[in-house]
């Protein structure tokens, strides 16, 4: 398999695309939003293959990277870009990653179906560099008339953000909402913060959700995830390392596998 086959490019609309790393169990999603004078790339994937090459097939515009959070599977190709933004709470993660490289490599290897022929795990590294700009809560990005609202949603990680596309009513939810296991069990996670972050999303007029993993174009499931956290909160179960709770399309994990 060559590197270009690592990504599946999915067209969402004429100016919005998803790059899905479908050959890995994480199925990490990154999103390209194309404007007239520049484009925004939401996350850069796992770093197994070049996402810049895939972006270049769709646009030659300057790229501004918005990082939903600084976990390894969302910053893998940050090294390919110069204009990188992140919430202040995780800016230092880019300069000094808080998880061991061996742990990252183990996670990468244990759940992949296959890798490109030129991928060598011994050469894999985590991005180290400074942010070009910091993203504050409620900051609005104007992508040539397309308004994007950054919402600070800590819980999965301290600097997690969601991007709400005001113009199209899309929510790019990072790892806050997706179909699968929502993780709250490792360094930097906070289940109560996660619960309170979901409150910020309840009143948004959402047409579709585009998450950081797995199936894209989800119907609005914010209320369902919030109700699940609310139920656990009322049962005094919003504690780390205290179980796995299943709610159908998603589960909430407070204990390591």
Image: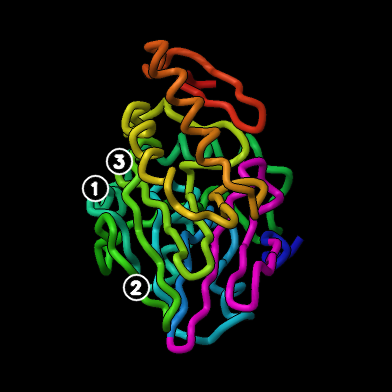
At mark 3, the secondary structure is: loop
**Which of the numbered marks, if any, corresponds to residue 249?**
none
At 68% from the left edge and 69% from the top edge, which residue is drawn? 11
Q: Nearer the viewer, mark 2 or mark 1?
A: 1
Q: Nearer the viewer, mark 3 or mark 2?
A: 3
- Judge the density around disc 3: few (<14), some (14-19), many (≥20) Cα neighbours within 10 Å: many
Which residue lies at the image location 42% right of the left edge and 81% below the top edge?
A: 145
Q: CA distance from mark 2 to mark 1?
A: 18 Å
Name the image quarter holding the C terminus: top right
Left/right placement of residue 107 relative to residue 215 reads: left
Q: Residues within 10 Å of mark 2 (few under 14, many from 20)?
A: some
Left or right: 38 as drawn, with respect to 20: left
Q: Which quarter of the rendering shows the N terminus?
A: bottom right
Q: What residue sits 35% from the left and 71% below the top?
A: 141
Pointers 3 and 1 in contact (C-beta within 8 Å): yes
In the displayed structure image, the side of residue 19 where residue 102 appears, left or right: left
Magenta residues span: 8-37
Q: Is residue 232 magenta?
A: no
- Of 222 and 104, nearer the camera is 222
Using the image as rendered, state which of residue 98 and residue 241 is in the foreground. 241
Label 1 sits on residue: 89
Q: Residue at x 69, y 65 (%)?
A: 10
Count of number-bearing discs: 3
* Residue indicated by mark 2: 83
Asked whether residue 101 is in view, the answer is yes
Comparing 233 with 85, the one in front is 233
Upstream in sequence: badge 3 or badge 1: 1
| Residue tagged 3 | 158
């Amino acid at each position: 398999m060559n590197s270009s086959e690592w990504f599946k490019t999915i067209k969402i609309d004429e100016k919005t695309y998803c790059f899905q790393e479908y050959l890995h169990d994480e199925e990490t999603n990154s999103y390209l939003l194309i404007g007239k004078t520049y484009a925004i790339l939401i996350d850069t994937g796992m770093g197994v293959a070049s996402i810049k090459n895939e972006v270049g097939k769709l646009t030659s515009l300057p790229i501004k990277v918005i990082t939903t959070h600084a976990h390894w599977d969302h910053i893998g190709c940050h090294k390919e870009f110069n204009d990188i933004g992140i919430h202040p709470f995780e800016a230092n993660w880019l300069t000094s990653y808080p998880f061991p490289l061996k742990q990252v490599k183990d996670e990468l290897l244990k759940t992949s179906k296959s890798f490109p022929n030129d991928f060598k795990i011994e050469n894999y590294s985590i991005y180290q560099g400074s942010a070009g700009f910091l993203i504050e809560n409620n900051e609005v990005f104007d992508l040539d008339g397309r308004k994007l609202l950054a919402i600070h949603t800590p819980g999965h990680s301290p600097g997690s953000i969601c991007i709400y596309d005001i113009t199209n009513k899309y929510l790019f939810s990072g790892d806050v909402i997706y179909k699968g296991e929502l993780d709250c069990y490792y360094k930097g996670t906070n289940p109560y913060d996660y619960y309170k972050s979901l409150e910020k999303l309840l009143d948004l007029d959402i047409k579709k959700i585009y998450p950081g993993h797995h199936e894209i174009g989800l119907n609005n499931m914010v209320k369902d995830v919030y109700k699940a956290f609310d139920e656990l909160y009322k049962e005094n179960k919003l504690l780390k390392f205290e179980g796995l709770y299943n709610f159908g399309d998603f589960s909430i994990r407070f204990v390591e596998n």
